[in-house]
Amino acid sequence: MSYPAQIQRLIDSLPTGLWIDGKQTDAIDGNRFDVIDPATGAAFTTVADANGKDAARALDSACGMQREWAATAPRRRSDILRAAFDAVIERADDFALLMTLEMGKALPESRSEVTYGAEFLRWFSEEAVRIQGRYTQSPSGTGRILVTKGPVGPCLAITPWNFPLAMGTRKIGPALAAGCTMIVKPAEDTPLTMLLLAKVFADAGLPPGVLSVLPAASAPPVTEPLLADPRLRKVTFTGSTRVGKILIEQSAHNLLRTSMELGGNAPFVVFDDADLDAAVDGAMAAKMRNGGQACTAANRLIVANAVREEFTAKLTDRIAAMSVGPGYQEGIAVGPLINQKQRNNVARLVDDAVTGGAKIRIGGAAIDGPGFYYQPTVLDEVVPGSSIVTEEIFGPVSAITGFDTEAEAIAAANDTEFGLAAYIYTQGLDRALRVADAIESGMVGINRGVVSDVAAPFGGVKQSGLGSEGGVEGIEEYLDTKYIGLTK
Ligand code: NAD
């Protein structure tokens, strides 16, 4: 298919090699793979396909720079991150269009992600110069305790496709601020955004070797040799719980530091004293952001029976008004899903729920034609235990169940092995804090449908992960603690 001139110009200007030693390079074996536009289902370009030999090159480069980057003045590291922030904002239109092209989300959503993703570079440029240690006296009075923080060393970041920029910057920002070098293995569906970011960093003055990007059609040939190499010191991963567990096992051999941002199954609890219009606004954000393809997406709408019908009717009206189509077209609210596999999975979950007794209020089917579209859908009376409430939907489907008492709502919210985000709508402060305390999750939004904030620690409990990204906590993931003992 042919694209409008602006899109084609962007495609023609993109880096599509591997990014090693501060520049583009072909894969050693010369392999490439297709990058698909999910709005059409067709390839719009190809990208170099890394393997283990390329991984070794990137790790040589990262290790060669590690000592020098760690010794680079924090102010200099900060200035480079800040310059990269400015450059991403300057090229916001390109980044947004590119993400829409390779991932499918509607352009306004991509623009929001550029702002959110860039913000991690600015935040960690500010944190780079605030790495703290301490100096104290031992309780016996006979010794002094000096505690210093230093970079962990070369890191591997493995990122998902749903937020192609932000899931990278949330790792690259703190790693570089702390003085670590980093190799990024972006998702195979969305390799180009990270390559463009690497170019922007190089233009902003980042020394070669500090940041490498290795797109690959298949992850293990790249990641396994890196994890097996004792020079690598850390792996930071955002993606599914299934793959996170594999990576933790593989990290055991060299006892790597690990950060794991894994799957979610967020409850969105609406109490009978909630402001229902605000709750519907919140549900639209928590459910429909990114077409539902977010780890923080409201997977289960748990609504007080006293207000369930009113809430469901209002939500259904709002969802009915959403236009579906290619994300780069004006006025589109919901783009395609990322690929055919994901669309099949959403269809399976909806079909299972309906077979189990759920009622379709709107939608409920894939959209025929090119591209991977699924109708925005509302299901009511979903039966507890259905696969749609135990698995991540990752699509534009709202699954509603009812409850009568606060205790029932809490039990339903916690009835999952995941614990990433949760949302509560109530006008009672006591209830809000009581329920927030009782819900087993790393993040709770009270009367708000989006919790992500660069200044807050993002992370999960239970099978949603280990560690935090963002906030003052984020840089700690890339720092080792050293104790130096002195006599008095
Ligand atoms: P995924 O786990 O399939 O893939 C994520 C990344 O891991 C990709 O780069 C992929 O190539 C790589 N990968 C796949 N198999 C691998 C292996 N065996 N060894 C090494 N790397 C491997 O996940 P996805 O479908 O890309 O992303 C969706 C998932 O990510 C969802 O579960 C979502 O909840 C989760 N997610 C979590 C967060 C968070 O912050 N907690 C944020 C976004 C997405």
Image (tube, rainbow, N blue to C red):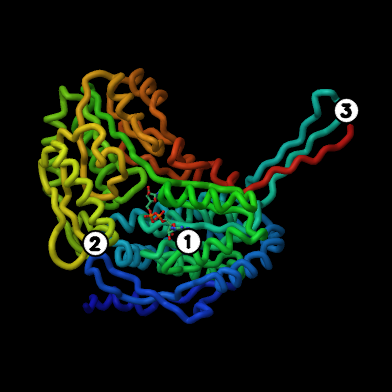
Circle 2 crowding by C-alpha within 10 Å: few under 14, some 14–19, many from 20: many
The quarter of the image that holds ligand 1 is bottom left
Q: Which residue is mark 3?
A: 142
The residues tagged by marks 3 and 2 sit, at their Cα atoms, a distance apart of 66 Å
Determine the secondary structure under disc 1: helix
Q: Secondary structure at mark 2?
A: loop
Residue 324 image offset from top left, x and y in percent: 17, 57
Q: Read off the residue under disc 2.
A: 327
**Looking at the image, is mark 3 or mark 1 nearer the viewer?**
3
- Residue 122 in picture, x, y percent from top left: 50, 53
| Residue 335 % position (x, y) | 23, 58
Q: Is residue 35 above or below residue 380?
A: below
Residue 128 visible, this angle: yes
Q: Amino acid at mark 3?
A: Thr
Describe residue 35's horizontal placement relative to residue 382 as left or right. Answer: right
- Judged left or right of residue 141, residue 49 is left
* Label 3 secondary element: loop
Residue on which disc 1 sits: 86
Q: Position of residue 158 (x, y in %)?
A: 48, 57
Name the residue rendered at 28%, 40% in the picture.
299
Image position of 378 with respect to 342: above or below: above
Looking at the rendered structure, the kind of residue marked 1 is Asp
> Can residue 122 be seen here?
no
Q: Earlier in the sequence, mark 3 or mark 2?
A: 3
Q: Residue at x 10, y 41 (%)?
A: 361
Q: Quadrant of the C terminus?
A: top right
Q: CA distance from mark 1 to mark 2?
A: 25 Å
Mark 3 C-beta to ligand 1 under 8 Å = no
Q: Quadrant of the N terminus?
A: bottom left
- Point out the tag, 3 or 1, that comes first from the N-terminus: 1
The foreground one among 207 and 263 is 263
Location of residue 414 by image quarter: top left
